[in-house]
Image (tube, grey):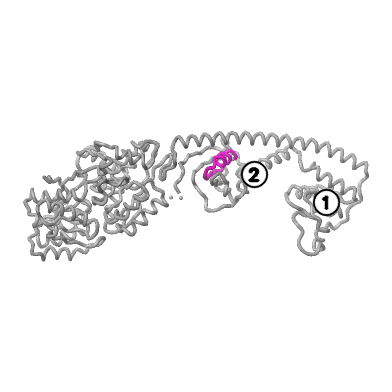
Amino acid sequence: MGTQPEPKLALSGNLSETSFTDLIQFYSMSRQTAAVTIVSPVGPDQDGILYIESGDVVHARFGELSGIDAVHRALRLKEGQFRVELNKRCNERTIFEPWSKLVLEEMCAEDEFNVESAGLDPLDFDTDRLGDTEAGLRAGHHVPDTEEEQIAMIASETKEGPRYCPVCHRRYRNGTVCADDGAQLVTGTPAMGSPKAALKTLPKTLPPPPPSRRGLYIGLAVAGAVAALAIGGVLWQRAESEKQFREAQQRATAAAIAAEQTRTAKQSPAVQGVSDTEILLGMAAPFSGPAKELGRGMKTGIDIAFAAVNEAGGVNGRKLKLVALDDGYEPDRTTAVMKELNEQRKVFGFIGNVGTPTAQVAVPYALEKKLVFFGPFTGAGLLRRDPPDRYVFNYRASYAEETAAAMKYLVEVKRIKPSEIAVFAQQDGYGDAGFNGVAKMMRKYDRDPAQTLRVGYKRNTSDVQDAVDGILKTRQKIRAIIMVPTYKAAAKFIEKVKAEHSEMIFSSVSFVGAQALAEELMGMGPKVAEGVIVTQVVPLPTSKSTAVLKYQALLPKYSVGEKPDFVSLEGYLAAQLMIDGLRRAGRELTMETFIDSLEGMKGIDLGVGATMSFGMSEHQASHKVWGTILDAAGNFQPLELE
């Protein structure tokens, strides 16, 4: 949400217990990628963050500082909180030095600061500078003895890098006074051109006469003694620092080995969409356009199932998270959404996708990438191949099973002849899938499917006038219409046909979105709604079965304001099946172990009145079809289909 990510090892704590130096060593030596955030006790203006990628320190910010300066400043912080986010990368790079050099530089700087704090300045006794001072004295040149002059020369001596004489342009590697003319050295390299250009930097006064040799010897003796003490102190401090550094390295190495062992034990290899604490799943569905209620309903059902299991501790210690993106029920948009979910959001797999025409592009993509395509809101045959595709699993009964149940009810219960039944279907793969189910039953009843009247409309529109005219103008006697539509188009079609044939029987498949259809029809009047049949793949959402009661209890808790609905109940039941499969796969979750666990699920009883199963040759859990019929109040009542 970017890359799948390696498994995450969450870490947070206090710098008083785990130093920032140890954190850098640990994540650098173990070659990890991480972002270490520091929360300073001073305030947010002094907070910082450091990025490590594959063991290299690449960028840092601390307050207003960035780069190496920010690292040095952060290493001095002894108090505060830290938080580590693994596999978090930075878009810029400001640091190109090895991490070990950054740490050693700051440790040395701290050593020098400690010596100075004790009243000893190791630079005052630098042997090279003493040599330069003696040479200056012997040459009769000025040796600075005022405090300001000494501070200036000491400051120049502390800087690494070349220096040169501004008079003769002779270059030096150390020292502060030119051995040829006694001029004070300048840091850097001489500019191009005449040496005379640098004369402006010469002191305005001539050097004083040299001191007596007796005073020189006494001064040198005293300076040498003090220098020996100071150098000894510095060497002792340096030895202690190196000892501490070696111990820190040993701790970091041991921690890295332990982390590697933990990571290997917990999960190997890394699995996209799966971390130590989370499983990320994707959903491509319409959240805009005429079919948006179907996408919203499925997402609601999945969300409440995930929320309930997360509150109970997750699945094998991992929380479930859903990323749902809008494809508008248009296949062209579905392709882009599927790619984004996989390649950018890095999901483990897909659950609850909506629609047949969208599935025509989504399923091949999921199969190509070997990603599970679970519980889609469609009954199309392309998701029910024989033998089944390994990564495609369905919760619901197929459109063929729904239309077969409707045909059987109309012919055997209502005593309507097959020739008196027409089909109103969306003009795409969804409509074709529904019509194929009707055609199969027509052949069973010795009726040629080619003689069956079929009318329709274009996807994502409500332009049904041609379909209405087709029914009203046909010479065939039509008493019942099996519908394979979405809710807005279905409602308009029913309203217009009923205005001319009030006795017409309408039966729709479940994809219509029963509750949304009921609301549309009731807006047109009770007489329009009454008697409309909808086959369902879930029981009534107001019934009292075990699964439905659990669903009813969770709905107001996790989705305030939502009413029980067939679509959200289907999303909830599909999610329950996936949760069961994830739990059976265990902590060592991979795509293949998950698929194997699903194919081993037999006789699952979710509490809806029918048991469910998966297998290597069976990737559809439920084959149950329920009948419902609208009353004059706009409520669905159970309908016996046999």
On the image, the x and y values in percent for residue 196 come to 82, 63
Q: Nearer the viewer, residue 127 or 404?
A: 404
Question: Residue at the location (24% across, 47% down)?
Answer: 386
Q: Is residue 23 magenta?
A: yes
SS of the residue under disc 1: loop
On the image, the x and y values in percent for residue 25 come to 58, 40
Question: Residue at the location (75% across, 38% down)?
Answer: 119
**331 vs 79: above or below:** below
Of the residues shown, which amino acid type is indicated by label 1?
Val
Can residue 560 be seen here? The reply is: no
Q: Is residue 77 left or right of residue 490?
A: right
On the image, the x and y values in percent for residue 532 come to 14, 53
Count how many numbered circles sit on residues in the image: 2
Location of residue 20 by image quarter: top right
Quadrant, the C terminus: top left
Crowdedness near tag 1: few (<14), some (14–19) or many (≥20) residues, C-alpha within 10 Å: many
Of the residues shown, which amino acid type is indicated by label 2?
Lys
Tell me the magenta residue range.
Answer: 21-40
Precedes in sequence: disc 2 or disc 1? 2
Q: Which residue is mark 1?
A: 177
